Amino acid sequence: MKNSVSSAVQVEDGYVDLDLRKLGTAALIILLTATSVFYFQQAQSEDIRADRAELDAARLESQVEELNTTLNNVNQSLQSFQQRSEELHDINGDLRLKLGRPLVKMEYESRSSSGGQTQVSLTAANYGNTTATGVQGSCQVYREGADPSYDSFEVDIGTITNRTLEDVQTQASLSEQPKNSDQVLCRIESCEGTCQILHENLERFQASSTVRNNFN
């Protein structure tokens, strides 16, 4: 009787030991599974963060490129503005320099004849801020078929006050009687000091189709 009870207890102890072993194994499996799931989730989270960081980096790089492009455009605009400002400064300086000295020009106006003499009226101008002295001019008379002109005469203007227009009268000694269809071109030939002459280039004027003043 005593042996039977002992044998039953041993069997029961064996079941107890077996159940504990199973429970431990199950707990270990659960722990390992939970650990695997945890680390898997952590890895996924890291991948998501890495992808987000990569997207953020790409977005930031794109913004930096756009900013660089904008800065380059602004820099080019500033350089163009600076260049234009320098050009305008040079132009203004050149204009101030020119206006600070005599700027002379002469144009033919009309003619009249009396007693075989031809009286010519001219307009002489000085657009500068300084009086022009020693001003000498000349006029060439053109007639169809003549090459390049059939006659010319000199004009002694002398002095032209700054910023003035002056009427100049002179006698023209012509080799032929002028016709109303004749054309005339008058220009300043020389003046003293820093005087600057304003006129069309004679050769270009002759080659162009510009109508010259009628010698009427």
Image: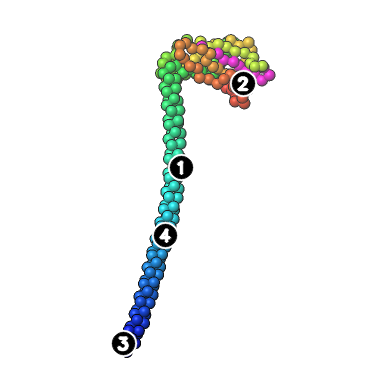
Observer-nearest of 83 and 1: 1
- Residue 46 is left or right of residue 216, and the answer is left
**Residue at the extreme bottom of the image, as rendered:** 1
For label 3, the residue is 2
Query: Mark 1 sits on what residue?
Result: 69
Q: CA distance from mark 1 to mark 3?
A: 99 Å
Image point 60% across, 19% down: which residue? 203
Whole-angstrom CA distance, mark 3 to mark 2, is 151 Å
What whole-number distance in Å separates the C-alpha atoms at marks 4 and 1? 38 Å
- Estimate how packed mark 3 is, as few (under 14), some (14 to 19) or many (20 or more) residues with alpha carbons within 10 Å: few
Residue 216 locus on image (x, y percent): 58, 20
Distance, label 4 to label 3, CA atoms, is 61 Å
Please report the bounds of the magenta region as a residue range: 136-146
Q: Can residue 58 be seen by looking at this rendering? A: yes
Q: CB under 8 Å between callouts 1 and 2?
A: no
Residue 120 in the image, given as x and y percentages of width and height: 54, 15
From the viewer's side, name the closer residue of 33 and 121: 33
